[in-house]
Amino acid sequence: MSAASEEELQFLQELPIVIRDSMDVISNLLVVLLCFVLRKSALIKDEHLPGIAAMTFKVCLPALVLTVLWSANLRAELFQAIGWSALVSAAWILLVTLLVQLPIFPMAERGFMAMATSGVGIAYVIPVVLGSEKFSPDDVGFAAMFDVGGNMLVGICYYGVMNSIYASANPTALKDTKDEEAPATPPAGTIAMVSELPVRTTSEPPTAHRWEAVALSEATEVTSTSRELLRRCQELSIRLFTNPLICALFGGVMLNLCQVPLYPVPVQALRALSGAFPPLLYAFLGATLKFKLGRKSYGMVGRALFFRLCLCLSMFSLIKYVLPLEDPMSSVLALTTVCPMASTFLMYAIQSGYAEEAAITYSLAAILSIVILKLLVTIV
């Protein structure tokens, strides 16, 4: 052991036991605080955030999942997590759908609340599983399968449906379709040519020609609805099959099943990207943290965080103590439910007109999950 390692070990042993056991959480929160300060001092700018997000969630996280599944021991219980994920996700969205109907939630906020209190982003549980002595690197596969089994559909389909239903109740929501054209008005300084002749009105019964026109109008409306539904299904399919995390998951499983050797060069590159994921994740969290809302908006954020915490702990208890699951699957799946909402929450919330509220809700939920995951990993 080198002299530096001995000094580091001695330093850790001299720390109070509470601080020593929480060094990883403290270091993660320090990264969040540092990047928050850098953002406030304008060293990290708005134009930097898309690049950090892309590197974190579209490069490093898929590289981590691909590496783990490529080298993992694909046992049968790993694939059983898909079915349990579908069951838990269905129960979760059912509870959320009923919850947002309570009168304490205004109609304009229900879509936001439904998205804020459902679904999880598995990115935050992966560093916890990899850093705990209770789990092996193969156990990260349970979190990945939980994402595929139903959680990813919650983040894409359920979020999209709830956003479509309730977005119209918020006047600041972004419209997907073009505004209806206003009736034409004559230019200033001109005289509108309006006929003053009396117009004859009749109450004649509709003729066959008129019935044909009505039927044609209804058929056109049905066709337009079908085309819109088909367009939305195509967009959903594109999002699913071009998602880097899904591609990495299926790629890792196929490489493993085909027994492709772990070649040194690509594996070392993937491990380098995987190692960069945790610090990038916490850096992105600190850089996106903002506090510039009104009192009413903070009230909405507080309600969302409170009900999300209650639902997350309920799902944690359901998986850990009610469902007939064994360790390590029960522990990993239970910890996964405590993660913050899926990143697609930010995209849909922007469309609903709640961009600032979504950013602070996601950031605070992520910080809470870092602390709660540290507490719960000791009891699972």
Image (spheres, rainbow, N blue to C red):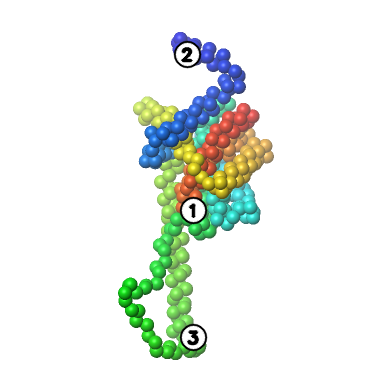
Whether residue 299 can be seen here: yes
The numbered dot on residue 196 is: none
Q: Is residue 315 left or right of residue 256?
A: right
Question: Where, by quadrant of the figure, is residue 188 drawn?
Answer: bottom left
Report the Cα–Cα distance between label 1 and label 3.
43 Å
- Residue 193 percent location from the top left of the image: 34, 81
Report the Cα–Cα distance between label 3 and label 2.
92 Å
Q: Is residue 300 above or below residue 166?
A: above
Residue under pointer 2: 5
The crowd level at tag 2 (other Cα within 10 Å; few <14, some 14-19, many 20+) is: few
Q: Earlier in the sequence, mark 3 or mark 2?
A: 2
Q: Earlier in the sequence, mark 2 or mark 1?
A: 2
Question: Where, by quadrant of the figure, is residue 45 drawn?
Answer: top left
Tell me whether circle 2 and circle 1 mark residues in contact (CB < 8 Å): no
Amino acid, disc 1: Ser
- Residue 241 percent location from the top left of the image: 42, 47
Residue at the far right in the pictured view: 322
The secondary structure type at the circle numbered 3 is: loop
Residue under pointer 3: 206
Tell me which residue sits at (45%, 56%) in the image. 174
Question: Where, by quadrant of the figure, is residue 372 drawn?
Answer: top right
